[in-house]
């Protein structure tokens, strides 16, 4: 099941995985990229090993540096050479499909096939490469929107620019290729209203989760990207009605007439609810 909440922190954060478990984040995201100064990249890689000395309490994702940089290649080789297999590897500023194919091939060569690859769309070039795709790159499990870097690439302020048009493209592409879409972090740490607006908007567009940069953001992200108890009850009622009356594709449920699209969505709600998830 796609993680809803991704708690992100630099590789040097000693308790990231424990904190992610404590606040019920679905996945701990260890960063080797933007939060690590250039002269400390090698040290961050060495520190990464410490996070995997014991089985982690929650699934772990690792954001490496861009594969168009020396540090990105070193990050990837470090994972391979030390047999570090996080649940997810994030490829920043990804150019598709080449970089996903490269990472996938190398992981398969080392029999590290359990690793999921998420491409971060955070530059105009990344978005353009996504537009040109005609099929899902083998190994791609998800797309992540990087709002701050995308705004910087456009030469506009990250905090005031409306980038919803990019989010729509990412959400549509994710749906087209059958992968998950994850939203960029909310950078307003004390404004719960802004986080609420961002999570609701992302959910309406079809995103499956959101990155958090502070533990306090996790509860709202989990709630917003989980079907409500009422939605689950409604979906169960609709599916039950369709199984009871198989003679017609159009049903009356309560005061509404519903057809195949409603039933399809109801099954998606039940699938996303899955077993009872941590709220």
Image: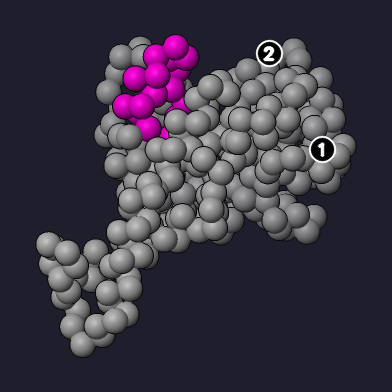
Magenta run includes residue 105:
no
Q: Nearer the viewer, residue 223 or 60?
A: 223
Residue 84 percent across, percent down from the top left: 80, 43
In the drawing, does residue 194 fall left or right of residue 58?
Answer: left
Residue drawn at the location 80% of the way across and 55% of the way down:
110
Q: Is residue 238 visible?
A: yes
Alpha carbons under labels 1 and 2: distance apart:
22 Å
- Judging by the rendered image, the residue that carries numbered circle 1 is 52
Q: Quadrant of residue 24?
A: top right
Q: Residue furthest front?
A: 254
For residue 37, which numbered disc appears in the image? 2
Residue drawn at the location 43% of the way across and 22% of the way down:
186
Residue drawn at the location 37% of the way across and 56% of the way down:
232
Q: Is residue 153 visible?
A: no
Mark toward the start of the polypeptide (1 vs 2):
2
Magenta run includes residue 196:
yes
- How are the residues colored? one colour
Q: Quadrant of residue 105?
A: bottom right
Dot 2, crowdedness within 10 Å: few (<14), some or many (≥20)? few
Residue 248 percent across, percent down from the top left: 18, 83
Q: Quadrant of residue 130?
A: top left
Residue 12 percent across, percent down from the top left: 75, 19
Q: Nearer the viewer, residue 23 or 173?
A: 23
Residue drawn at the location 29% of the way across and 81% of the way down:
244
Q: Which region is colored magenta?
A: 183-199
Above or below residue 3? Residue 271 is below
In the drawing, does residue 96 fall left or right of residue 65?
Answer: left
For residue 35, which numbered disc appears in the image? none
């Amino acid at each position: 099941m796609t993680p809803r909440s991704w708690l992100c922190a630099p590789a040097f954060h000693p308790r990231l995985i424990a904190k992610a478990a404590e606040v019920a984040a679905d996945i701990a995201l260890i960063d080797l990229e933007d939060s690590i100064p250039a002269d400390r990249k090698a040290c961050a890689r060495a520190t990464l090993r410490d996070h995997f000395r014991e089985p982690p309490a929650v699934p772990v994702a690792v954001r490496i540096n861009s594969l168009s940089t020396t540090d990105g290649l070193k990050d990837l080789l470090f994972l391979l050479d030390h047999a570090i297999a996080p649940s997810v590897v994030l490829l920043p500023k990804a150019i598709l499909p080449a970089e996903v194919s490269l990472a996938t091939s190398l992981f398969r060569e080392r029999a590290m096939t359990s690793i999921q690859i998420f491409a971060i769309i955070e530059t105009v070039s990344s978005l353009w490469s996504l537009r040109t795709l005609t099929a899902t790159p083998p190994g791609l499990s998800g797309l992540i929107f990087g709002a701050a870097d995308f705004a910087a690439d456009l030469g506009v302020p990250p905090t005031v620019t409306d980038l919803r048009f990019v989010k729509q493209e990412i959400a549509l592409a994710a749906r087209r290729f059958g992968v998950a879409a994850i939203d960029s972090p909310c950078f307003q740490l004390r404004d719960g209203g802004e986080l609420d607006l961002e999570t609701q908007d992302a959910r309406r567009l079809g995103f499956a989760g959101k990155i958090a940069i502070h533990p306090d953001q996790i509860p709202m992200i989990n709630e917003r990207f989980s079907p409500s108890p009422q939605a689950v009850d409604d979906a169960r009622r609709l599916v039950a009605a369709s199984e009871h009356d198989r003679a017609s594709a159009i049903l009356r449920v309560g005061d509404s007439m519903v057809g195949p699209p409603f039933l399809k969505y109801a099954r998606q709600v039940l699938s996303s609810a899955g077993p009872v998830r941590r709220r």
